[in-house]
Amino acid sequence: MSVSQFTIERFSITSAKPFADVVKAIESSVGHPEIRQFLSAIHDARDDQELQRMVRDVVGPTELMEFMRFDQGDVLRHELGPGAPKVIRLLIGNPVTMRKMAKHVHDAGSYAPVTILVDERSDGVHVSYDRMASLLSHYENQEALSIARALDANVESILTAAAQ
């Protein structure tokens, strides 16, 4: 058994825009495949070229796609009522990007797809993301870190645009 400890960098931006507008802006930046069908097709792909084509066909303009979302605010509303803050956790990514990182650092699969948290607070809508490079820096693999940094820049650009 081993336990590792490392520092995680969290990118966070606060928006004055309504919650729904921030979420809609993020949604418009990423693809939205029917995930069960997509995963089945990926599994059945004949070769890597077909897999890459399938991914290209479903990612959005930022080369990312939504895998899943959790409406955590819905759970809060059950206890706190209709005035509970809105909270959504989005899992976004690109299977090919994940593969490129995991090829060098297998543990990258623990962090991809990435999580984006959009939550409503008294001072605005917070949009947060744990930087992939900070999650992988512990492994000291420059190839994986280079890919992670590019992913971070892409995600942070999406979040910044959504919040402004």
Image: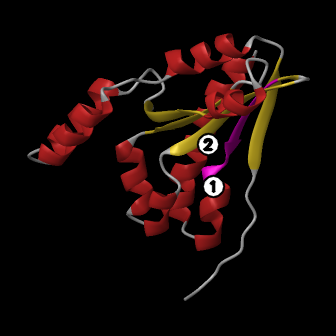
Q: Amino acid at mark 2?
A: Asp
Check the picture and name the quadrant holding the N terminus. Answer: bottom right
Question: Is the residue 48 above or below the residue 141 in the image?
Answer: above
The x, y position of residue 112, in whole percent, is: 48, 50
Q: Nearer the viewer, residue 141 or 33?
A: 33
Q: Amino acid at mark 1?
A: Ala
SS type, badge 2: helix
Q: Tell me, for residue 133, which label it has, or none.
A: 1
Tags 2 and 1 in contact by the CB under 8 Å rule?
A: yes
Identified at 59% across, 86% down, the residue is: 2
Q: Does any portion of residue 105 appear in the rendered image?
A: no
Q: Tell me, for residue 158, which label it has, or none.
A: none
Magenta span dominant secondary structure: strand
48 is within the stretch colored magenta = no
The residue labelled by disc 2 is: 152
Q: Nearer the viewer, residue 25 or 117?
A: 117
Question: Is the residue 11 above or below the residue 119 in the image?
Answer: below
The x, y position of residue 134, in whole percent, is: 68, 58
Identified at 73% across, 29% down, the residue is: 119
Give the residues drawn in magenta, as a range. Answer: 125-132
